[in-house]
Image: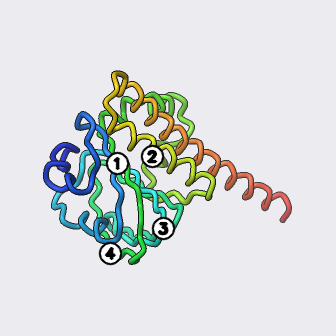
Amino acid sequence: MYNLQEYYNRFGKEYLNELWNGKMACAFFNSTRALTTNEMTESLNCYTFTLIIQGEMTLMNGDNQLSFSKNDIYTYYPGSFIRIIDVSHDFKGICLFVDEQMTHSAQAFRNLLRASMIPLSQFGKSKLPLTKADAGRVHSVMMLISEYISQPLSLKNEILEMLYSVFIDDLISIQAFEKTRFSISKQSEEIFI
């Protein structure tokens, strides 16, 4: 299993912007770059969050075939093995790579476990469709993270950890809203039928 530093050294230097402390990086993908994922012979020991900005992508995650389009976010969790089957010629995406230990130590992740709002397996859900507004907000946070990774700042650790917590909190909030919305719709349907 590759850790993030090994992945960066072997595959990522031309695709990832600067790698921060071996813990976090951002990458911008087009159709050609997305297919380089298939060159990996081992899985990654990190979480990745890929927001589809434009176009479509189809991949195999284990035995499951998943299709993604604009405003979908794909979550990769450690130990998964993926193979990209197809990407449209106009594909564009942004991907946040975060070390597994950093994810597990993030305040938002600890809050999630403590509150047990959403099962851990939901957090590892591979596909999350976002509304245009949610996708815009998630994209903005990813762009901020990308920008701060490359800045020489004295409080860089604290800023990046805080931004990552905001990112995770936002995904948790989106998932909780989707779960509530689905539950309410189903309950309403049962009442009126």
Q: CA distance from mark 1 to mark 2?
A: 8 Å
Say if mark 1 contacts mark 2, CB within 8 Å: yes
Above or below, comparing residue 159 to residue 48 in the picture? above
Furthest residue toward front: 152
Q: CA distance from mark 4 to mark 2?
A: 25 Å
Q: Residue at x 53, y 37 (%)?
A: 169
Earlier sequence position, callout 3 versus callout 2: 3
Residue 188 placement (x, y as % from top left): 80, 57
Q: Which mark is residue 142?
A: 2
Above or below, comparing residue 152 to residue 95 in the picture? above
Q: Residue at x 38, y 53 (%)?
A: 95
Q: What's the residue type where badge 1 is placed?
A: Cys
Q: What's the residue type where badge 2 is placed?
A: Met
Q: Quadrant of the C terminus?
A: bottom right
Identify the residue position indicated by label 1 in the image.
26
Identify the residue position indicated by label 4 in the image.
85
Identify the residue position indicated by label 3 in the image.
54
Earlier sequence position, callout 1 versus callout 3: 1
Earlier sequence position, callout 4 versus callout 1: 1
Earlier sequence position, callout 4 versus callout 3: 3
